[in-house]
Image (cartoon, rainbow, N blue to C red):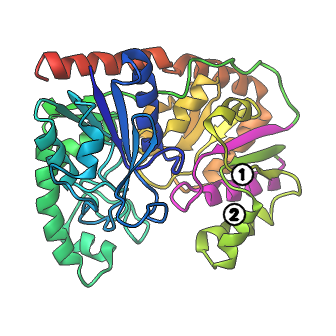
Amino acid sequence: MNVLYVAHGHPSQARGGGELAAWRLFKHFSTLYGPTNCGLLAAARSTKSFPPGCEVMGLAPNQWLLKPSSNPVIHNTAVNLGVNSSLHQALRYLEPNLIHMHHYLHLGVDLIHALKLWFPQAKFVLTLHDYWGMCAHEGRLLRRSGDLCPGPEVEACINCLASTEAAAYLAIRAVRMKRFFAAIDHFIAPSYFLKQQYQTWGISAKKLSVIENLPPTQEQASHQPEFYSTLRLGYFGQVNQWKGLNIILEAVAKAQGQGANICLQVHGIDADGISEGVEQANPFHLHCAHWLGQIKAGAVQLNGSYQETELTERLLGVDVLVMGSIWYENSPMVIQEAFCHGLPVVAPKLGGMAEKINHNKNGLLYEAANTSALASLFIQLAADPKLVARLKANARKAGLGLHRAATQHERFYAGCLFNNK
């Protein structure tokens, strides 16, 4: 089997969940099928690294960077898609019979039509990592006002785009997205919540399969049932207004104000990153800085970004992983990463997060953006080491494991190719 993975970013440049999902599959199946039988085509972060006239660059054997598209609303393709184009020349030796796409953002929706022309024998699969298909504003089903969105409505979408060209863009986008989605043979949804949203939007349930993304590695050593005088909370991943670090910081300050003995380790940004945002008067960073100033000295560590090879060591340094997301996250990588390391997760009761976490079993759930509710959970955990130990034990059992997740993909691939799925 020859598989081409197509992603909206390469993990050497972008470390979002979708990029990592594609990368982990590429690495696993390169080992399983052979390194010459798998390829990875990823959009570059910017055009700055491309020489004039260059559209495709080899990054490593069977890994290519593609010049990124410029419009995230109509998803145009920024490269030549002719039969003799440099992209076709780069890919033609792979001759994939399965093309597993992980996005169209930065890649452009026209890319699939070229790939279908070049490789007519290939089956096309798309893993849906978010809601870009139906949501032209950041793909989060989150309105510009910050309110959760029940689904696309023309007037609401125009308001969210806040552009004089919004109506025209949405009309063009609707046609382009319809053609793109019609060209996909089957879709993977990493959560039942996301599957339901796309069914409601119009994709047939017969074309949607729920399969979890691959966790980072084989199962890791779990936490020992030891108790610390200070409960160590951990935040991992991207730091932005949608991930809610500001909400977590406010809850930590409130919990400390009520006597909770807790500390927070932030893995994803350092003090300079907060300062830069404050200098630019970014409301999110200003909010973070305000609450950092309210927390006891030394109770928050801003540990900066990290590589996947550092993940285990950092996860083993905390007792509970905390999330603050304000949107319907689909299947955050960090949850499976935590479970595979025996870490319980505290997260908002939204989307796929509420689906992955069994409240009071392998983690705790709270009302999204409710800092008082989150602070109460911090107080409860800090006061009850036995609860933390029980949650840790159940978190380990909840971990999907690399072998199981990979086997699900193997069976799915076989079904696509041999059962005309």
Identify which residue is drawn at 69% across, 17% down: 221
Where on the picture, by quarter, is residue 55? bottom left
Q: Is mark 1 on a helix, strand or loop?
A: loop
Which amino acid does the dot numbered 2 rest on? Gly
Q: Which mark is residue 102?
A: none
Which segment is the magenta one? 230-259
Tag 2–tag 1 contact (CB < 8 Å)? yes
The percent position of residue 263, horizontal first and vertical second, equals 80, 46
Where on the picture, by quarter, is residue 316? top right
Res 141 seen here? no
Distance from label 2 to label 1 (Cα)? Answer: 8 Å
Q: How many marks?
A: 2
Magenta stretch: includes residue 217: no
Disc 2 crowd, CA 10 A, few/some/many (<14, 14-19, 20+): some
Circle 1 residue = 304
Front-lying residue, 402 or 233: 402
Q: What element carries label 2?
A: helix
Which amino acid does the dot numbered 1 rest on? Gly
Identify which residue is drawn at 28% across, 15% down: 411
Front-lying residue, 82 or 224: 82
Front-lying residue, 375 or 392: 392
Circle 2 residue = 273
Identify which residue is drawn at 11% across, 45% down: 182
In the image, is residue 178 above or below residue 334? below
Where on the picture, by quarter, is residue 293? bottom right
In this rendering, would 22 be left or right of 365?
left
